[in-house]
Image (cartoon, rainbow, N blue to C red):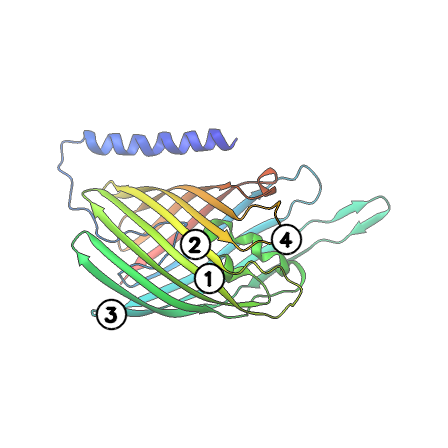
Amino acid sequence: MKHHLLGVAVTIGSGLVAARVATAEPLRQADRVHDFHTVDRLTPQTTFGFELGYEKWDSGGPFDPTILGFDVSGHYVSDQGFGGYLVVPMAYVSTPDVVVGPLVIQGDSEVAIGNLELGGMYARQVDRRLDIVAHLGVALPTADDTGPGALQAFAAVPRYGDLAQRWINSSWLRLGVSPMGTAGPIFWRADFGLDVMLTDDGGDGVDISPILRLNVAGGVDLGPADVSVELATNVVSNDDPNADDSASTFAIGARLDGQIQPGIALILPVGFDGLEDYLDLAVAFSLTGRM
């Protein structure tokens, strides 16, 4: 199923590129700033956004949770390049009733808030085709850790680099730098980040700090829409020699151009250390606006 969906997405993207190239109308000048779907969200332009990610879990048994991750975000950039950002992550987690012999384990559902993140940023235009964005922020320990909300870390798949925003009973120092640029209709971005756990209020939680974030993404500006491919990777601290230290998500996405830009992306897990047998895919819907 994964390979079939991936093939359909590639075919659609290739068709859009071919159709755009085949037109006699000359290409307009490509945008300088582009919004991706699964890598870091900060850009040199003031932007607000809403994202909703749906994950398809299939364990082959009765316990298949329904998990939705969503967030509201925004960042402001002044003419001098200084600015700030805010992300409010949330999750919907629902667990089904499970029957074990004569026993019925009651399911539950909850909308849970994650770790609210805020921070400062600086954007510098190196030349007309290259920008660099740096940020430093803190994810506050606001994540709900009761009931189904305690499972909200699983809702991080659509924006995997923001795992720290959904890790319960913890606060984080988050920093990163992102070069990004264009070459004609081609646009690209890379992210290098580090997340360091500041507090672990649970005490008995798994300490995955520090998290090294490495993302790469590229796309084609088709005029009325963009298409992109993205790879987001987390490298975590892990004391288990039998467990993987890194995991990634691979995404193919499309986004309409304009002041308000709706987007959609198909996301596949890569190297999720046993979870790939249960996590089939994720689909992310987003809406971004520029000011």
Residue underneath mark 1: 195
**Mark 2 packing: few (<14 Cα in 10 Å), some, or many (20+)?**
many
Instruction: Identify which residue, 211 or 29, lies in the foreground.
Output: 211
Do callouts 3 and 4 mark residues in contact (Cβ within 8 Å)?
Answer: no
C-alpha distance separating marks 1 and 4: 28 Å
- Please, what secondary structure does the residue beneath circle 3 have? loop
Residue that sits furthest to the right in the current view: 102
Picture mark count? 4
Drawn side of residue 285 relative to residue 94, left or right: left
Pick whichever of labels 3 and 2 is earlier in the sequence. 3
Amino acid type assigned to the residue bearing label 1 in the image: Asp
Answer whether residue 91 is visible to the viewer in this image: yes
Residue 78 — which label? 3
Pick whichever of labels 3 and 4 is earlier in the sequence. 3
Pick whichever of labels 3 and 1 is earlier in the sequence. 3
Answer whether residue 52 is visible to the viewer in this image: no
Residue underneath mark 2: 213
- Please, what secondary structure does the residue beneath circle 4 have? strand
